[in-house]
Image (cartoon, rainbow, N blue to C red):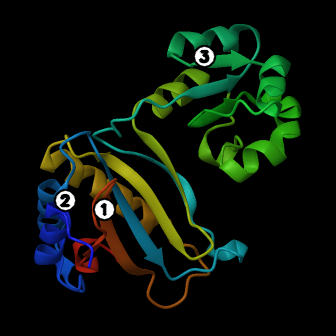
Amino acid sequence: MTKQTKKQKLLAEKLGDNQQHYGFDEALAMLRELGSKKFDETVEVAMNLGVDPRHADQMVRGMITLPSGTGKDVKVAVFARGDKAEEAKAAGADVVGAEDLMEDMQNGNLDYGRVIATPDMMGVVGRLGKVLGPKGLMPNPKLGTVTPNVTEAVKAAKGGQVEFRVEKAGIVHSGIGKLSFSDEALKENFKAFTDAIVKAKPSGAKGKYVRKIALTSTMGPGLKIDTADVEGA
């Protein structure tokens, strides 16, 4: 019989069959107790929604700026020319280009958290649909990533803005900060994210919209959150 580690024993003692639902504060306290001492884990929230994203009127997608930031350094690429390219660089974009950037991405250099483009560059960016689309990086005017205001878009990406998009199984998830964040900061981010999902309820959603919520950390267990903790759920 395999000998349990101290962490496995603690998990078994704390969670049992893990059927319990927790309030946010209690769940966060448990993640802190069970967290790794070797690195700063990301705290993540996952929501199981009563939607089928295969239908256009049940898609849940958007952007939300987390009030306390994400704790991550987001690498931003911007497609722009001339003055707009200079604006993007001044705003802190990591890479700015046009055809040269397109070719670089076609060659597999896609280590970016956000791709932004000015409207006049979409003829170039459009050739990257099969490359950027599967990674969720394709610039989109509805999400504010196709915009003439590259300064605002770059600063938002760097300052805690996250994109959410429901997956095939009806699950939407996102990191909401680091375990090193204060309880208040993580709770503010949790509320901002869950509120955004509730407000993004599509017209085609039927029955109960927010079915399950879970909170976890990079190395931690998934803890079920009482949906009563989310307004409008």
Residue located beneath label 2 in the image: 31
Q: CA distance from mark 1 to mark 2?
A: 7 Å
Residue located beneath label 1 in the image: 216
Q: Quadrant of the N terminus?
A: bottom left
Which mark sits nearer the N-terminus, 3 or 2?
2
> Badge 3 local density, few (<14 within 10 Å), some, or many (20+)?
many
Q: CA distance from mark 3 to mark 1?
A: 35 Å
Which mark sits nearer the N-terminus, 3 or 1?
3
Closer to viewer: mark 3 or mark 1: 1
Picture coordinates of residue 191, whole percent (x, y): 28, 58
Q: Are marks 1 and 2 in contact (CB under 8 Å)?
A: yes
Closer to viewer: mark 3 or mark 2: 2
Q: Amino acid at mark 2?
A: Leu
Picture coordinates of residue 79, whole percent (x, y): 73, 24
Position of 212 relative to 164 (above/below): below
Picture coordinates of residue 138, whole percent (x, y): 71, 43
Which mark sits nearer the N-terminus, 1 or 2?
2
Residue located beneath label 3 in the image: 88
Q: Is residue 157 visible?
A: yes
Q: Secondary structure at mark 1?
A: strand
Q: Pick the residue in front: 52 or 168.
A: 168
Q: Pick the residue in front: 119 or 210.
A: 210
**Residue ID at (29%, 46%):** 41
